[in-house]
Amino acid sequence: MRQVSETIPEELAPRVEAAVAWFNSVPESDGEAFKATGILDADEALSGSDELQLILCGGDRCEQHSFCVTGTPDAWSVEFAGRTFGQPSDKPQADLDPPPGARLDWLDNALMQHAFVVLLFYRGFW
């Protein structure tokens, strides 16, 4: 079973920051500023894998993406894992809710803009 953690291990922080910065610069981010709110299977990345599976949240959406991050802290090379840039993935989006707190600010911001907010939960999705 996949392990989801909202804490990024310190050893992976430079690679995660490089992946997030790269993702924020590609068209798939739609101009939103994403941040990493979780990591899947951090043990695999810590054991030497170049692949990082991150949960990124920005604007009003959270997504899971896999990145291949190689190189050194001075010159990271980042790309989507398992596909070339611009190609849609043949795998469906992972059915993962982001870790707790990822949308904490969203509700406060929505309540400041509207008299009330209706939240709809459907089969574990929000």
Image (tube, rainbow, N blue to C red):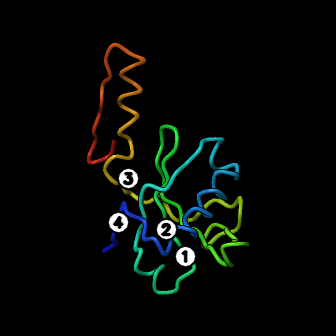
- Which residue is identified by label 2? 53
How far across and how far down the image is residue 73, in percent?
66, 73
Residue 98 numbered tag: 3
How far across and how far down the image is residue 37, in percent?
43, 55
Q: Residue at x 52, y 38 (%)?
A: 59
Q: Secondary structure at mark 2?
A: strand
First in sequence, mark 1 or 4: give its number.
Answer: 4
First in sequence, mark 2 or 3: give its number.
Answer: 2
Q: Residues within 10 Å of mark 2 (few under 14, many from 20)?
A: many
Check disc 3 and give the amino acid type.
Pro
Q: Residues within 10 Å of mark 4 (few under 14, many from 20)?
A: some
Discs 4, 3 touching: Cβ within 8 Å: no
Between 8 and 79, the one lying in front of the other is: 8
Could you tell me which quadrant the C terminus lies in?
top left
**Distance (Cα) linking label 3 and label 1:** 19 Å
- Which residue is identified by label 4? 4
**Distance (Cα) linking label 4 and label 3:** 9 Å
First in sequence, mark 4 or 2: give its number.
Answer: 4
- Which residue is identified by label 1? 51
